[in-house]
């Protein structure tokens, strides 16, 4: 009987450590994704602004507006509730 309890306790410890590791990894991936995504977005805004101040005004405005629209679109998409499959 003690062996069964020991086996169940070991299995529970493994499950808890696995679950904790999974939550930490998911948190890290989420933070890194947000940091890199907004860095790319701000880089696009900066590049568009720099191009628009030079001789490439059409390309600069297009890049600037595209980067802003992408950032706004991802923010709206992240706030929308998940769709449920039927």
Image: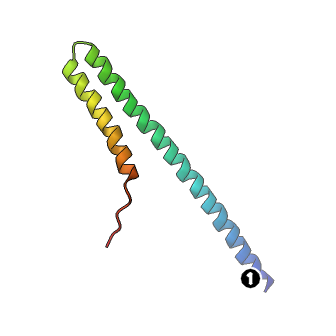
Percent across and percent down for residue 36 are 45, 37
**Residue drawn at the location 68% of the way across and 71% of the way down:** 12
**Residue drawn at the location 62% of the way across and 62% of the way down:** 18
**In this rendering, is residue 32 above or below 22?**
above
Residue at the extreme bottom of the image, as rendered: 1
Q: For this rendering, which residue is in front, 7 or 60?
A: 60
SS at mark 1 in the image: helix
**Residue 61 in which image quadrant:** top left
User: Which color scheme does this rendered protein use?
Assistant: rainbow
**Residue drawn at the location 34% of the way across and 63% of the way down:** 83
Q: Name the residue under label 1.
A: 4
Percent across and percent down for residue 52 are 26, 18
Residue at the extreme left of the image, as rendered: 58
**In this rendering, is residue 9 above or below 46?**
below
Q: Residues within 10 Å of mark 1 (few under 14, many from 20)?
A: few
In what quadrant of the picture does the N terminus appear? bottom right
Percent across and percent down for residue 65 are 27, 31
**Residue drawn at the location 29% of the way across and 28% of the way down:** 64
**Residue 6 in which image quadrant:** bottom right
Percent across and percent down for residue 11 are 68, 72
Number of marks in the rendered image = 1
In what quadrant of the picture does the C terminus appear? bottom left
């Amino acid at each position: 009987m003690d062996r069964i309890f020991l086996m169940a306790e070991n299995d529970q410890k493994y499950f808890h450590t696995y679950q904790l590791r999974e939550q930490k990894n998911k948190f890290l991936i989420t933070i890194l994704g947000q940091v890199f995504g907004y860095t790319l977005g701000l880089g696009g805004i900066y590049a568009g602004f720099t191009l628009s101040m030079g001789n490439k005004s059409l390309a600069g405005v297009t890049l600037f507006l595209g980067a802003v629209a992408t950032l706004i679109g991802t923010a709206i998409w992240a706030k929308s509730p998940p769709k449920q499959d039927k």
